[in-house]
Image: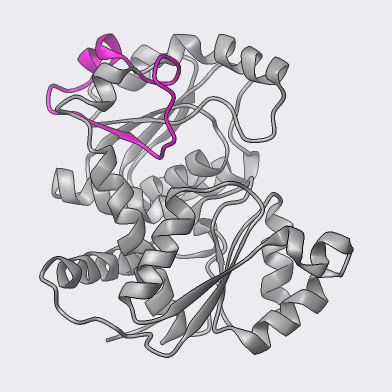
């Protein structure tokens, strides 16, 4: 299997070229085909990976565990509250020891600087399982799902409505890399990080596509091939912050009326968890246009691709 990534950390989509991201999606599609056909693909037999999750997780943690197992590897969950990190041990000390025990580390944490520091002190691959800045494994799953459903990326318009941080950031960059137009619809006070917007717009300019941030939900929905939702509030926010976000984002709810403004054959995507009656309605997520369960499955296949690419 041809490889471009051996020994590379996977911390953010912005760190890679469009060609490299396309390669990872192609690899994920091949691994998915093998999994579907029940063809052996235990490329990582004998390897062991550590997982550190400082935030709750359903899809990210379990997709990694399932992916590693399917590839013949083991994954071990390292509880943050049981590690010396929780007592103030420097990341660089923890990282250098983990590097001796494991063949790689999958980490969900808060600041991007944390995964970057782990990567600085580890030779084995560090994979970002979500930070405030990016969710690069989700970004790959999104690209794979759109390619499967649309047949191609070129000319596809994505309408994104929801929290404008990590998932949105990775989707913006990934969309621009493969030539899709992406419209991010959000209230005026909620904007993507400037460095992410700049990166996405550079890729868009190189690929003849557009990255638009707008308050106009109707503009974003018009002729959209993909309508993508995300939760409006994040883990750790207090009740007052949560209520404010629900109030601010309610005009951007993805419901039947919103879907009717997109193309007739548009698909509905959501990184999950989704909150029915808030960011989307039950009618939409359970409807014929919803592909969220296929999208969720693709998390496993794209994580496989990252593991194989960085480890072999």
Q: In the figure, residue 80 lies in which quadrant?
A: bottom right
Q: Quadrant of the N terminus?
A: bottom left
> Where is residue 71 shown, x and y percent of the image?
33, 78
56 relative to 105, above or below: above
Q: Quadrant of the C terminus?
A: bottom left
> Where is residue 291 shown, x and y percent of the image?
23, 38
Q: Considering depth in this image, is 69 or 251 the residue closer to the camera? A: 69
234 relative to 39, above or below: above
Is the stretch drawn in magenta largely helix, strand or loop? loop
Decide whether residue 256 is among the magenta residues: yes
Q: Which residues are magenta?
A: 255-280
Q: Residue at x 49, y 42 (%)?
A: 167
118 relative to 202, above or below: below
Q: Residue at x 71, y 51 (%)?
A: 111
Q: Residue at x 69, y 65 (%)?
A: 116
Q: How is the image coloured?
A: one colour
> Where is residue 36 shown, x and y percent of the image?
14, 65
- Is any atom of residue 178 visible in this view? no
- Is any atom of residue 186 visible in this view? yes
Q: In the figure, residue 302 lies in which quadrant?
A: bottom left
Q: Residue furthest right?
A: 88
Q: Residue furthest front?
A: 82
Please give the count of numbered marks on the rendered protein.
0
Q: Considering depth in this image, is 36 or 306 the residue closer to the camera? A: 36
189 relative to 164, above or below: above
Q: Is residue 201 left or right of residue 71?
A: right
Q: Residue at x 36, y 55 (%)?
A: 299
Q: In the figure, residue 243 lies in which quadrant?
A: top right
Q: Considering depth in this image, is 287 or 199 the residue closer to the camera? A: 287
Decide whether residue 56 is among the magenta residues: no
> Where is residue 69 shown, x and y percent of the image?
36, 74
């Amino acid at each position: 299997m041809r490889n471009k990534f051996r020994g590379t950390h996977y911390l953010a989509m912005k760190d890679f070229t469009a060609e490299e991201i396309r390669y990872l999606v192609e690899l994920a599609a091949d691994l998915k085909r093998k999994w579907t056909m029940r063809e052996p693909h235990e490329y990582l037999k004998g390897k062991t990976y550590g997982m550190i999750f400082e935030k709750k997780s359903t899809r990210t943690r379990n997709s990694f565990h399932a992916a590693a197992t399917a590839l013949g590897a083991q994954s071990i969950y390292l509880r943050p509250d049981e590690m010396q990190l929780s007592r103030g041990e420097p990341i660089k000390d923890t990282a250098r020891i983990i590097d001796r025990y494991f063949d790689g580390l999958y980490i969900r944490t808060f600041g991007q600087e944390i995964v970057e520091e782990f990567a600085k002190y580890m030779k084995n691959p560090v994979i970002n399982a979500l930070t405030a800045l990016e969710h690069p494994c989700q970004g790959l799953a999104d690209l794979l799902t759109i390619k499967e459903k649309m047949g191609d990326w070129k000319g596809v318009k994505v309408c994104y409505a929801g929290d404008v941080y990590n998932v949105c950031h990775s989707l913006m960059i990934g969309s621009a890399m493969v030539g899709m137009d992406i419209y991010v619809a959000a209230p005026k006070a909620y904007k993507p990080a400037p460095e992410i917007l700049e990166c996405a717009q550079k890729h868009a300019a190189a690929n003849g596509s557009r990255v638009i941030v707008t308050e106009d939900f109707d503009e974003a929905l018009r002729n959209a091939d993909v309508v993508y939702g995300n939760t409006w509030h994040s883990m750790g926010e207090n009740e007052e912050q949560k209520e404010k976000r629900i109030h601010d984002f309610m005009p951007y709810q993805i419901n039947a009326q919103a879907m009717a403004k997109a193309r007739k054959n548009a698909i509905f995507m959501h990184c999950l968890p989704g909150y029915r009656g808030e960011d989307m309605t039950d009618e939409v997520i359970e409807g014929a246009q919803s592909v969220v369960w296929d999208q969720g499955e693709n998390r496993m296949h794209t994580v496989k691709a990252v593991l194989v690419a960085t480890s072999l």
